[in-house]
Image (spheres, rainbow, N blue to C red):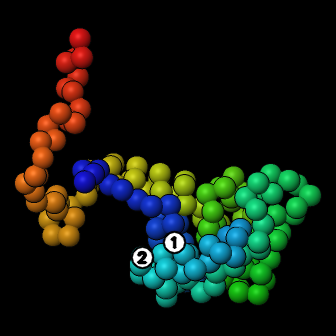
Amino acid sequence: MARGPVVGIADAAMHVASLIATGFSIATTLERSCIMAAHLAQAYGMSGFCRKIRAVDLAVLDLEDPSSESTARITHRAVEQDGRGAIVLGCAGMADLAGLISRQRGVPVVEGVFAGVKLIETLVGLGLRTSKRGDLDYPPAKPYAVDLSGLAPKPRGAER
């Protein structure tokens, strides 16, 4: 329904990583999120770039604890064993770790929140909007069996 561009954080991170490396590993916190990351990579056409999905079974709140060695645990296997050119952080709670991990590991680290914002800024700056032709067209009007007109928001200034 949106007129402007809508970009998901995983979508943004994977696409940005695919532009700067021939392959990436996704590093995430919980093992249970790996299957969703795999589904997203498939849905976004990124399966050929996404070579590994790694989880460290570390709770998001543990990222705040320096003694958890979260940055080392999150990225060691992704860099040392996978040998990938980039790392995608698979959890928005890891966003503030991207720069530190990149410096420590010497590899680009892409986090989706910032990548998503920057991609939207770029699309808007280019004057692009979400296409309203084909699959992303507005849905056709549908008749309703009940009167929903009382549920519509009031125009600005009408509440006075």
Q: How many marks?
A: 2
Where residue 5 sits, quadrant-wise, is bottom left
Residue type at numbered disc 2: Tyr
User: Residue 47 location in percent, x, y?
Assistant: 49, 85
> According to the image, label 1 marks what residue?
14
User: Residue 15 location in percent, x, y?
Assistant: 47, 71
The relative height of residue 83 versus residue 68 in the rendered view (above or below) is below
Question: In this rendering, would 143 be left or right of 46?
Answer: left
Using the image as rendered, state which of residue 29 and residue 120 is in the foreground: 29
The relative height of residue 157 versus residue 72 in the rendered view (above or below) is above
Residue type at numbered disc 1: Met
> What residue sits 12% from the left and 47% below the top?
146
User: Residue 113 location in percent, x, y?
Assistant: 54, 55
> Closer to us: mark 1 or mark 2?
2
Q: Secondary structure at mark 2?
A: loop
> What residue sits 20% from the left and 70% below the top?
135
Label 1, label 2: how far apart the Cα atoms are: 8 Å
Q: Residues within 10 Å of mark 1 (few under 14, many from 20)?
A: many
Question: In this rendering, would 94 be left or right of 125?
Answer: right
Q: Quadrant of the image for the C terminus? A: top left
**Callouts 1 and 2 close, C-beta under 8 Å:** yes
Of the residues under marks 1 and 2, which one precedes in the sequence?
1
Q: Quadrant of the image for the N terminus? A: bottom left
Q: Residues within 10 Å of mark 2 (few under 14, many from 20)?
A: some
Question: In this rendering, would 138 be left or right of 35?
Answer: left
Question: In this rendering, would 126 be left or right of 17?
Answer: left
Using the image as rendered, state which of residue 88 and residue 127 is in the foreground: 88
> According to the image, label 2 marks what residue?
44
Q: Residue furthest front?
A: 146
